[in-house]
Image (cartoon, rainbow, N blue to C red):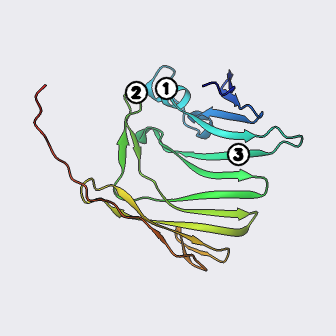
Amino acid sequence: RENYSKIRRNGAIWEGWTRDGTKYIYRSVSHHTSASAANGSDAHKLLFNQYWLLSEVIDAQAAAHKVTYDWEVRPQADGYAHRLNRISYGPYSISFNYDWPSNHFTYGTGTGILGKQSARLASVEIKRGSSKIRAYRLDYTTSPVTQQSLLASVREYGSNYSMSGVRPGSGTALPKHVFSYSPQSFYYSDATI
């Protein structure tokens, strides 16, 4: 089904427009880090060709509004794993805070370098300038089978929240939204082909 989007490469960026005129700008991982690599190397492919991260969204109104996305990029040893740090829109910002659990996951990058994501989203803060609006706290449990993190609960805090490390620790809060999971098990079945 045709969606009437337009996509074009413009030098070191990709630009996309939706039917309503909203423009999306994607930049390579290299734009978000000072790392460099030899041309033709696997590291160069990861920095300049493999991933394109959303950097800006600009609407088509007379006084265009711009949403900016700020990314953090890990070093080559982690396959330049990236994570969103902040979204900014006029005086508003959404900050993403992470913790570093001992368990991480690795993933293929399509090159000879494995990616390693060690960060886990711990909280989200929403502000207007330096004035707090609200925050969300995410807590986790560990899967007994895979030893990977499972989201256990999300809790929203009001504008009087205070941070304890990377998570809200106190303030007016709504009840937690708690998640539960079905028991996991691995099994093997001998199949004849």
Q: Is residue 33 left or right of residue 65?
A: left
Q: Amino acid at mark 2?
A: Thr
Callout 1 amino acid: Lys
The quadrant where residue 125 appears? bottom right
Instruction: Determine whether, in the image, residue 116 is placed left or right of residue 86.
Output: left
Residue tagged 1: 45
What is the number of the mark on residue 60?
none
Residue at 44% over, 26% down: 42
Q: Nearer the viewer, residue 114 or 19?
A: 19
Element carrying mark 1: helix
Q: Secondary structure at mark 2?
A: loop
54, 37: nearer the viewer: 54
Q: Is residue 9 above or below residue 190?
A: above
Q: Residue furthest right?
A: 62
The amino acid type, in three-letter code, at marker 3 is Thr
Report which residue position mark 3 lands on: 68
- Which residue occupies 66% across, 26% down? 12
Q: Is residue 157 left or right of residue 65?
A: left
Check disc 2 and report the residue beneath it.
111
Give the mark nearer the N terminus: 3 vs 2: 3
Q: Mark 1 Cα within 10 Å, few/some/many (few <14, many 20+)?
A: some
Q: Earlier in the sequence, mark 3 or mark 1?
A: 1
